[in-house]
Each structure stands twice: as structure tokens, then as C-alpha cells.
Image (spheres, rainbow, N blue to C red):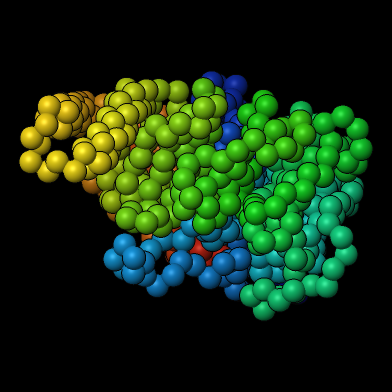
Amino acid sequence: MNLFTTISNHSSPIVWIAAVIVAAAAGLVQAEDWPTHRRDNYRSAITSESIQRPLQRQWISSSFIPPQTAWAGPAKWDSYANIMTLKSMRDFDPVFYTTVAGDSVFWGSSVDDSVHCVGLADGADRWTFCTDGPVRAAPTWYKKKVYVGSDDGYVYCLNANDGSLVWSFKPTPDAPRISNNGKLISPWPCRTGVLVQDGVAYFAASLLPWSESYLCAVNAETGSDQGEGFYIARHQHAAMQGPILASSTKLYLSHGRQQPHVYDLQTGELLGSIGRSGDGGCFAILTQDDVLFHGRGQNHKAEGELRGFNAQSQDHLATFPQANCMVVKTDMAYLHSKGELTAFDRAKNIVLQSQKNECLKKEEDRKKEFKKLNDPKAETEQAQKLLSDIQAIQNEIKQIDRELPSTIVWKTDVPIYESMILAGNVLVVGGKNLVAAHDAATGELIWSDAVEGNAYGLTYANGHLLVSTDLGNIICYAHKP
């Protein structure tokens, strides 16, 4: 039974393809695919394709049942930190995330346990492939094939044209299914999606930190794990979930309620973790100069945050309190936090925040030394020297705090946004019952439309904007002169 219904109100695919060709020839459109979650393996959510306005709704695909998330959500409150409104650190599947290649749209469903392909122009069904468990991550398109992981423990490679099975792979031993959200799933579901790079498909089968997890690299063409650069690496104390990120040498995996881990790309060996215990979340961006931005969900003494780290040294560089989505383009970063949309000089901001972190560490060390002296009145020369050092460090921190606002290019008050992508010079954002666009140079609101549900998923490709909401809707917009 098809649980999706599509309402379309526009012309045929032939008309759309012709329009794109004409516009491209006129230099108006540089069409680009969006072949994986947040477009690339850095999860940058950036395309150089410019948005042509005005945008008009073309079709909507609606599920009769909303997405069924893997986890119920955060605790009711954090009594230790006295925080009453917590955010989930495992919110990697609130919507049906989409990918686009050519004139096809792909998504996986946690409702009907299937992979769907529809036409980009009209939303018409092309094919559906059924797995034996929920599909939670966006499919990855690579060389005319589609790769998905399922809660049934398998990864599937499909022919992008017709959805026929090319190969399937399960790294785990046979075991009885377990109950999860009213369904029977593998004790080792694949909830990372599939990252494909240089002909290798990477994914993980994992659920609970007290059970073994499997990080895999297989031949993207054949599904074989035999040969150089292919492996099944077994790990303890891991709960791999959320999209994988990759540089040329390393893999970065989120672990939900704990900090992300780093693995060797060639061997799957664990290289370490980034951040402190409890620095959880499933939102992550890796910049091309090796800065990892990670987080989003609740953290002790914070109502959610994003944190920046040097991905090589693993040093903590910056913290953005209550931030829930961002995009980073070279030295410019765009951030949403507490109903404010901000553009800032990323390099300058991180330098200042790094200096502040160093000062805070020095201040903490000096205070510990002073406490050990057991000289609260500072009667000794050593105690007086430590107090003088502390005062100097605090003055330096105040100076940095005065300089930080100079890194801001613009700031504007906005509704609460949950997602953000950058298309050309336009920031597209999604929030509660809303999708909008802001000029990336000024922050000016230039377009908006009402949608049903929270718009957590955004894709812009080949002249079309796709918006996925937590009510199970996928809305497609396009420019119509």
C-alpha cells in the first residue's frame, strides 16, 4: 500500500528540462545535483547554484503517517543543571531527507520502510524499493546508483533508474530481531546512512554502547569488503548514528549523547574522540581547513549548543550557545541562535574565542593554585602574585569580549529556525510552519512561504527547492517566470 500521496500543479518534465537548458544557455542557471545528505561528504549544505525568484509551489508529497523517529526525544528536564526545556541529541531523522540527481528525487522512509524515487518536475512516482526496516537517512547517489542503510541491518545498492537491487551487505551475525517503536529491527541497524567516496561505501551498524558496533568500508561497485581499503572494523563503547563525515584521511561519526569519534579512513581504526563526555548531538559540519562544528542538542548547563574544534589536534576552538544550525563558507559563517540570524567572520571569531578559551584555562589553573596555598587573605608574596595574574587574565578576557562583536557582519531577528542551507548568495532556512530565504550579504528577508510542520530538511538542486517537514510532507518549489 502506498502511504504517500502527491499533489502536482505544473507542466510536464519535458517542459521543465527545456526551461533549464534554455536558462543555462543564457547564463541564468548553473544547475547542480544534491547527491547526499547536506550535499557533500563535508555536510556543508552549500551549492553554488543560484536561486531564481520568485519561487512557486510545484508539488507536495504527503505521508499519511508522520516520520517515526528512532528515539522518542530528550528527557523531560535536566534536574542537575535546572534546565526545563531540553533538546534531543539524537534528532537525526525527524523528516524524510531528500537527495537529487538530474531530474530524480530520492528519499528513505521510516514509515513504510522503503526508498522512494519521484520526478523532480512533477513528483510523480518512478519506483519504490522495500527494505525490511525503517530507512532513516537520506539516500546517497553515486555513479547512477543509490545507496541506503536500513534498520534491518543491511545496506542496499540500487540502480538509480529503476530501483532494482545491485547488491546488499550485512556486516553483523544473524541474531533475533528486537522491538523498537512498534517494529522489529536488527540489533545493529544502519542509522548513519552511506557515505561514498572514491569508489568506497562507508557506513556503520550500531545501536547501543554496551554492544559491539561495526564500521564498514566496501567496494561501492560490488559490495565486497575484500581488498585494500575495505574492511569491517569492530568497536566497543560506540553508538554510531547520524550522517558520517569524511576528509581525505579520516571519518567522523556522531554518537548521540556522547562526543563524536574519529576513525582512520583506510582501516576503520579508532583515532580518538573530539570534545568532552556529554558533548553530544548529531549535527556536524567539517570545513575544508579541518574545523569540525558539532552539537545541537542539550548539554549540561546549556540549552543546546554548537562547538568548533580543530579536527586535527582536537582542540576546542569555539562555542556558540543555543545555536541549532549553521553554514560555513570559507571565512564566512552563518548561524542561528535564540531567534537571531547572524553572519560573522569565522576566522577572526574563532581566533578570538580560542584566545578566550586559553585565558579561561589559565584563570582556572591559577585559581586552583591559589586555593592550594590555603591563604585566603593573600598574605604571602606567592598568593599576591597569583591574584595579580588572575586579575590580568580577567582583564584580557574582558578585552576579547569587547572585540568579539567586531566579527559580526550582520545580525537580524528572525523566527526560530531549525535548518539552513546556502544556495548561491541566498540563505534558505526552515522553521515551524515556515520556509524562508535571506540575502546572504545583508540578512534581508527576500521570500517566505507557510508550510505544515517543522521544516528540518532543505535541498536545493537543479532549479528546485525541496522542503521536508516533520509531518511527513515534502514540498517542491521552483521559479516560474
Image quadrant where residue 199 sits: top right
- Residue, x 41% and y 57% (percent of image)? 298
Would you say 176 lies left or right of 406 here?
A: right
Q: Is residue 413 visible?
A: yes
**Camera-side residue of 203 and 462:** 203
| 97 w.r.t. 290: above or below | below
- Residue, x 14% and y 41% (percent of image)? 375
**Camera-side residue of 158 and 251:** 251
Rendering coords of residue 203 (x, y %): 73, 46
Rendering coords of residue 461 (x, y %): 58, 38
Would you say 285 lies left or right of 436 here?
A: right
| 297 w.r.t. 310: above or below | below
| Quadrant including the N terminus | bottom right
Image quadrant where residue 76 sits: bottom left
Q: Is residue 441 visible?
A: no
- Residue, x 60% and y 38% (percent of image)? 272
- Residue, x 52% and y 57% (percent of image)? 257
| 395 w.r.t. 164: above or below | above
Rendering coords of residue 105 (x, y %): 67, 48
Would you say 221 lies left or right of 100 here?
A: right
| 179 w.r.t. 409: above or below | below
Number of marks: 0
Rendering coords of residue 470 (x, y %): 51, 63
